[in-house]
Image: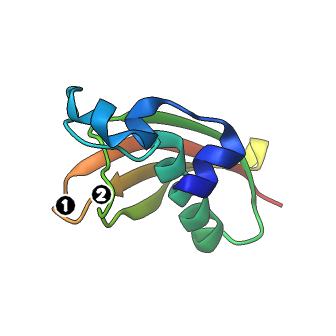
Amino acid sequence: MVLWVGLTGDMNPVHINKEYALNTRFENVIIPGMMVAGLISTVMTQSTFGNVYSGQTLKFLKPTYVGDTITAVATVTEKVDEKRRVKIKTECYNQREELVIVGEGQEYIL
C-alpha cells in the first residue's frame, strides 16, 4: 500500500495515518479504492487474454481494510460483434463474501 500511495500521490490521511483514520467513519486505515479496483484489471486480462481493456465503471460499496483478502470476479455479459467488444460484469468480494466493488468493464476483441 505504501508503494501505491507513493506512486499515485494519493496522500489521503485515511489511507496512511492510523490516528486520523480512527476518528473517521471507517474507524481504521482503509485501502485506496483504486488500488483494490486494480485487481479487476488482472482478472479481466486472465479471463479474456489478448483483448484490450477499454473502459470500466466502478461503485465502491464497502471499505477495504489492511489484512482483507479480496477476490475479483469478471463475467462476460454481452458480446457486441459489430463493434468487436465485450461487456463484462466486474465484482470484488472480501473474505466475508461481502461485495465491496461492483462495475462494468469493456474490452475490444482483437
Task: Estimate the x, y position of residue 20 in percent, counting from the top left.
Answer: 32, 30
Circle 2: residue type? Tyr
Q: Nearer the viewer, residue 41 or 88?
A: 41
What kind of element bears circle 1? loop
Identify residue type, mark 1: Glu
Q: CA distance from mark 1 to mark 2?
A: 5 Å
- The reply to whether the C-beta atoms of the residues labelled 1 and 2 are less than 8 Å apart is yes
Q: In this figure, what is the number of numbered marks?
A: 2
For residue 78, side relative to residue 98 (left or right) = right
**Which residue is at a point 58% across and 71% down the rendered structure image?**
47
The residue depicted at 53 percent of the width and 42 percent of the height is 34
Left or right of residue 13, residue 88 in this image: right
Q: Residue at x 16, y 62 (%)?
A: 96
- Residue lying furthest top in this view? 24
Q: Disc 1 designates what residue?
A: 97
Q: Is residue 5 left or right of residue 12?
A: right
Image x and y of residue 52, in percent: 77, 55
Residue 57 at x, y percent in the picture: 53, 34
Q: Would you name the residue on which mark 2 appears?
A: 93
- In the foreground, 13 or 40: 13
